[in-house]
Image: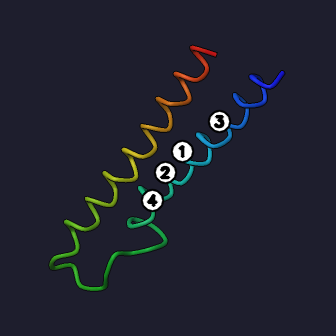
Amino acid sequence: MKLVTNMRIEAIINLVILVVGVIVAIAPWTFAPVCVSQMRCWNTRDVETVLGASIALLALVSTYRLLAHG
């Protein structure tokens, strides 16, 4: 019973991390623009998108491994 509870908690944490990663990846393109001037902001926007996507990918892989080995 305790193992099932721990698995559920880990799955919920992974889901929250996945959602945060998706929000970080989408934010600079939609509701949280990086800056007003377009000169040097493209690199910041790209890095934030890649960072958010990698966070979401790691959470997805972690969830898959949890369910596969659970």
Q: Could you say where residue 63 lies in the image, as x and y percent from the top left?
A: 56, 29
Tell me which corner region of the image, top left, top right, bottom left or bottom right, holds residue 66: top right
Compared with residue 54, is residue 6 higher up or lower down, i.e. above or below? above
- Label for residue 24? 4
Label located before the other in sequence (3 or 1): 3
Q: In the picture, which quadrant includes the C terminus?
A: top right
User: How far is the residue under mark 2 from the one under mark 1?
Assistant: 6 Å
Q: Is residue 27 left or right of residue 16?
A: left
Q: Which mark is residue 18?
A: 1
Give the structural element (helix, strand or loop) at label 2: helix
What is the spatial separation of the Cα atoms under label 1 and label 4, in whole angstroms?
10 Å
Of 24 and 64, nearer the camera is 64
* Chain-order first, disc 3 or disc 4: 3
Q: CA distance from mark 3 to mark 4?
A: 21 Å
What whole-number distance in Å separates the C-alpha atoms at marks 2 and 3?
A: 18 Å
Of the numbered discs 1 and 4, the one sitting upstream in the chain is 1
- Looking at this rendering, what residue extends furthest in the bottom direction? 36
Residue 22: assigned label: 2
Q: Residues within 10 Å of mark 3 (few under 14, many from 20)?
A: some
